[in-house]
């Protein structure tokens, strides 16, 4: 099975990545990420990152890749 790929949400420009739910919760609680809730349904293992910081995004992408591949 192929791992899901992170993407940039077209409408907002937010980076959308899949991470462990226990990682997403504190990121959302501290305001570092937004809940990813397409069509009003929140996905607990997905987070939206509104800040376009290439260094931060590289770190998040590496973390997401490790989570989905391992």
Image: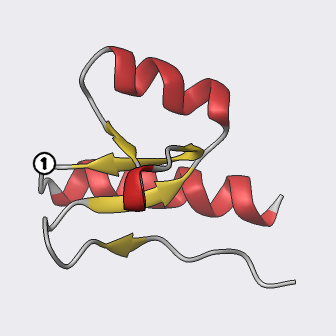
Q: Residue furthest bottom?
A: 2
Q: Which residue is mark 1?
A: 51
Quadrant position of residue 54 = bottom left
The C terminus is located in which quarter? Answer: bottom right
Q: Which sits in the foreground, 64 or 39?
A: 39
Q: Is residue 29 above or below residue 24?
A: above
Q: Is residue 7 above or below residue 68?
A: below
Q: Residue at x 29, y 61 (%)?
A: 15
Q: Residue at x 51, y 23 (%)?
A: 25
Does residue 49 appear left or right of residue 5 in this picture?
left
Measured as percent of width and height from the top left, residue 5 is found at 55, 77
The N terminus is located in which quarter? Answer: bottom right
Q: Is residue 43 above or below residue 28?
A: below
**Dot 1, crowdedness within 10 Å: few (<14), some or many (≥20)?**
few
Does residue 65 appear left or right of residue 26 in this picture?
right
Q: Which sits in the foreground, 11 or 27?
A: 11
Measured as percent of width and height from the top left, residue 55 is found at 23, 53
Quadrant position of residue 58 = bottom left
Q: Label 1, secondary structure: give it.
A: loop
Q: Residue at x 13, y 48 (%)?
A: 51
Measured as percent of width and height from the top left, residue 33 is found at 30, 36
Measured as percent of width and height from the top left, residue 56 is found at 27, 48
Quadrant position of residue 8 = bottom left
């Amino acid at each position: 099975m192929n791992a899901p790929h992170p993407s940039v949400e077209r409408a907002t420009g937010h980076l959308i990545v899949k991470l462990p739910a226990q990682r997403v919760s504190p990121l959302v609680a501290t305001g570092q990420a937004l809940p990813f809730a397409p069509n009003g349904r929140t996905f607990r293992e997905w987070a939206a990152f509104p800040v376009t910081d290439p260094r931060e995004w590289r770190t998040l992408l590496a973390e997401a890749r490790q989570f989905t591949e391992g």
